Image: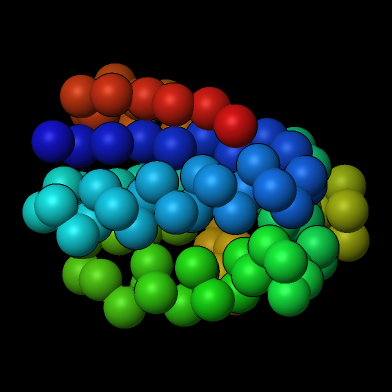
Amino acid sequence: MKLAIILSTNNAEKNWNALRLGNLALKNGDNVSIFLLGEGVEYLKFSSDKFDIQKQIDTFLESEKGEILACETCMVIRYQKGDKTCPVSDMKELYNLIRGSDKVVTF
């Protein structure tokens, strides 16, 4: 299955749970794409001991079946630069991701 997860919040608990779902899907052999949109591009800023988003993303990035994409416009608005945990992408890529996925979930 191709699973797309769209993160549009910087809420630590929601993003932690979304990443846990993504990691479970990867363990089950699925392909998982995460698209960061709006406040979602700030998802790592709120990692904590209670909601260890960094640990979940480290696990996610170890898989060859997982990818992360981030809205460039949303990053520019927040003066944020791209890196491996928040790679620059665009709406066209989000559209293609949705179009090519079997399931899409949003957080």
Q: How many marks?
A: 0
Give x and y (percent) for residue 57. Answer: 50, 69
Note whether residue 36 is visible: no
Horizontal placement of 104 versus 101: left or right? right
**18 or 64, which lies in front?**
18
Does residue 79 show up?
A: yes
Where's residue 7, x and y in %?
60, 39
* Residue 85 or residue 77, whichever sits in front: 85
Quadrant of the image occupied by residue 88: bottom right
Which quadrant of the rendered structure holds the N terminus? top left
Q: Residue at x 25, y 71 (%)?
A: 63
Image quarter in which the C terminus is found: top right
Is 66 located above or below residue 77 in the figure?
Answer: below
Lateral position of residue 63 relative to residue 85, left or right: left
**27 up-or-down from 48: above or below:** above
Instruction: Measuring from the top left, give residue 40's x and y in whole percent.
Output: 70, 45
Counting from the top left corner in percent of width and height, residue 105 is at 44, 26
Q: Is residue 67 left or right of residue 34?
A: left
Q: Relative to residue 15, is residue 86 depicted above or below?
A: below
Question: In the image, is 36 to the left or to the right of 78?
Answer: left
**Residue at point 62%, 66% (across, down):** 53
Q: Nearer the viewer, residue 95 or 20?
A: 20
Q: How is the image coloured?
A: rainbow
* Quadrant of the image occupied by residue 9: top right
What residue sits 80% from the left and 63% below the top? 46
